[in-house]
Amino acid sequence: MVNTTIKTTKSQEIFAAAQNLMPGGVNSPVRAFKSVGGQPIVFDRVKDAYIWDVDGNQYIDYVGTWGPAICGHAHPEVIAALHEALEKGTSFGAPSFLENVLAEMVIDAVPSIEMVRFVNSGTEACMAVLRLMRAFTNREKIIKFEGCYHGHADTFLVKAGSGVATLGLPDSPGVPKSSTITTLTAPYNDLEAVKVLLEQNRDEIAGVILEPVVGNAGFITPDAGFLEGLRELTHEHGALLVFDEVMTGFRIAYGGAQEKFGVTPDLTTLGKVIGGGLPVGAYGGRRDIMSMIAPAGPVYQAGTLSGNPLAMTAGIKTLELLQRPGTYEYLDQITQKLADGLVKIAQETGHSVCGGHISAMFGLFFTSGPVHNYEDAKKSDMAKFGRFHRGMLERGVYLAPSQFEAGFTSLAHTEADIEKTLAVAREVLASL
Ligand code: KE4
């Protein structure tokens, strides 16, 4: 039996059955709660900032289906737009005006994007952008950063973050050496390491790809000058700069981290928010580079459900909601109250912690820190994080089930939700 004070009978029954049907009982590893212990709760429905599990327990949600629910779950205007779209069919596999609409919104919003291609996940977007950067530069090697996660394509599964870090699978079986031999890694925030790699592999690096604010090694922010330094170094070496904004896009700011920090990459990947909870990924950037993508150019990439009308509809409505005045001020205000409150309460109850937020993204490490990179993040007390996670869960607060993830707020989170979360956190932290 799981040592929990909340009634989770139905969750346990369903999850037990799931494990005979799907590997680990889940369709994405991090959902299995492996690193925090205990069993996951099985969701029944979500609305606004809340989750209800199959046993009827209610939770304040800080995962937001890993980012898409930035306007709150099941926003009435998104649902209404989807109902209308559904009447016209679920998939076309042909051009539709909706694709033009969302493409124009993305191009208008994201500084680096002059042209965009929609796909069905962040992984697909990162796979495509990898092929594109290699084709454009006629070079094969890439530089990524330890702890950053760019989806599960072979080439990126090297010192990756998120579920890979959580499960301690820095180099997953089944990934041939030939796929990773061209992947060079550096510590996040270490410009000197990047400079050395570029010089040691002169004229061989197609590009540098990173999360401009890390969410997959826990929440790690770029040091002052780091992003600007990468922009200069990649220019100097004829390499492309790629921001993976699958998580940060439209969350850190409407124009993403590149707008917030004023650094414009050559290519950007997106996902999550732009699908409003339906499967969408995207990659885009300079017109001269994107024009290489088939059928305009020779670089092949395709997808049956790419630009799906339902996903486009949910994305369009979500971005419309985010464009409303006061959105990012509100997100910053409530997330600051939450993140600063959690750090303060943890310190008051005797824990070594560090953490913070940028806009609607936050994180907390059980280490005095500071956390500048993945090595620092790995020094945090994972066991304590697991106990914290379970304690919060039992009191109706749903946090990401891994130290190597970030937290997400939404426009639906109220001041009262934040107050309640901080009160629960004080109780849990005092008991750890
Ligand atoms: P997806 O293929 O999961 O849509 O996107 C991959 C991806 C790419 N780049 C970044 C920066 C990402 O954060 C992600 C996916 N994020 C994880 C959460 N850390 C998705 C959750 C999961 O794997 O279940």
Image (cartoon, helix red, strand yellow):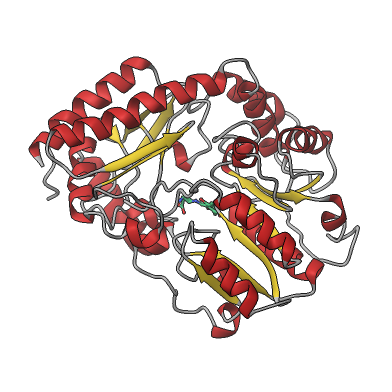
> Relative to residue 31, is residue 24 depicted above or below?
below
Q: Is residue 216 in view? A: yes
Total labels: the figure holds 0
Viewed as shown, does residue 64 lie left or right of 37?
right
Image location of residue 380, percent across then percent down: 25, 54
Q: Which image quarter holds the C terminus?
A: top left
Image location of residue 113, percent across then percent down: 76, 44
Viewed as shown, does residue 229 lie left or right of 10?
right
Depth order, front residue of 235/140: 235
Image location of residue 202, percent across then percent down: 69, 77
In the rendered image, the residue lying farthest to the right is 296
Give the residue at x 56% y 20%: 327
> Relative to residue 55, is residue 168 depicted above or below?
below
Q: Quadrant of residue 25?
A: bottom left
Give the residue at x 89% y 59%: 295
In the rendered image, the residue lying farthest to the left is 431
Give the residue at x 57% y 16%: 326
Depth order, front residue of 107/372: 372
Q: Is residue 59 in view? A: no
Give the residue at x 75% y 35%: 102
Q: Quadrant of residue 85?
A: top right
> Relative to residue 103, is residue 36 depicted above or below?
below
Image location of residue 90, percent across then percent down: 70, 39
